[in-house]
Amino acid sequence: MKKYFSHIYWMFRTWPLRWDFPSYKIMSIDYTIDDIIKNRKSVSRFGDGEFVLLLKEGDIGFQKPDLVLSNKILEVLHNRNPKFLIAIPDSLSSTNVLNRFSKVFWLTFINTHGKALSKILDKKYRYGNANITRLYATRKNKSKSKKYFDKIKTIWENEDILIIEGNLSRLGVGNDLFDNAKSLQRILCPHKNAFDRYDAIKQAVTNYGKNKLVLVALGPTATVLCSELSNEGLWAVDIGHIDAEYMWMLMGVKHRIAIKGRHVNESNNSEGYELDLEFAIPYNKSIILDLSK
């Protein structure tokens, strides 16, 4: 009870820091997924990391600050290609569905960065919801998570998919996340500072991604890549975090924990990166190019 009242007091005490933060038009999770499927839209997702790099206000750990990257992230926010959707967290408009820790995180984020963000974001644009891949760990009520995961899976149902990921991300390995895809191939990239290899990554996707759904999980590099690929006529969706969130749901955990065989930026991996043989064989077969070295 003491923590609850302390939380309420903090909410009111910090209210002046965000009272004039604009209310942006952000689609629901359901509507965002529907828009992607119906209109085959490409999507770039913005989270706290992308905003921090854009505002040049810090290091996010797995991607060092880079002026070229910051400028490209800003270009993404200006992309008005009708086949492209910019997605920002609905947490910027409402924190009602979040657990207490996540709610405080996002309110603090607005307290700190809201004034700068309000000069960059567009009050007239209808944004997609970046939390289409944040469907479990941060949610206060996790009962709807499975329904949301089942729905987002329909994006790649019967599609030939090309996954662009960090070399330790291993999306879909050991679970059924992509079992409904027609086919699956992977291009591996560095799990840290992937933007250093941006030109090579983009060229590889251009070579291998035609007539495929390109699914990208590569932090801020994914944000830039999906926008630029969309402008070149490819279908590219930023799905960072989805595999870890899906695994946490399957495990039934209440908090983010390490996942064996994967690098998860938001938890310390105490489980190791070695894959069980039954998962390693199909995973290795799916790799068509390794740009991580």
Image: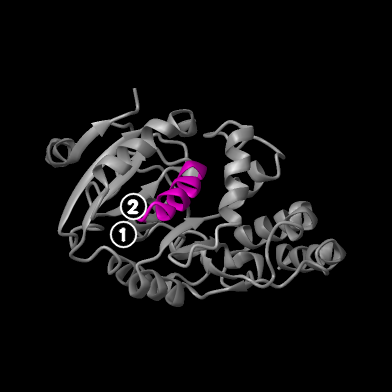
Please tell me whether mark 2 sits on a helix, a strand or a loop.
Answer: strand
> Pointers 2 and 1 in contact (CB under 8 A)?
no
Horizontal arrangement in the rendering, residue 123 relative to residue 133 (left or right): right
Q: Position of residue 58 (x, y in %)?
A: 69, 37
Within-10-Å neighbours for mark 2: few <14, some 14–19, many 20+: many
Mark 1 residue element? helix
Q: Which residues are magenta?
A: 220-235
Q: Is residue 264 magenta?
A: no
Q: On the picture, is 123 further left or further right than 141? A: right
Residue at left 13%, top 38%? 285
- 246 vs 207: above or below: below
Q: Quadrant of the C terminus?
A: top left
Identify the residue at horizontal 49%, vertical 62% (top origin). Answer: 81
Q: Can residue 202 be seen at all in this image of the molecule?
A: yes
Was residue 225 drawn as part of the magenta stretch in this picture?
Answer: yes
Q: Which mark is residue 152?
A: none
Mark 2 against mark 1, which lies toward the viewer? Answer: 2
* Residue matched to label 1: 250
Left or right, 284 with respect to 1, comes to: left
Label 2, on which residue? 215
Residue at 48%, 44% (x, y): give it. 219
Closer to the camera in the image, 128 or 170: 128
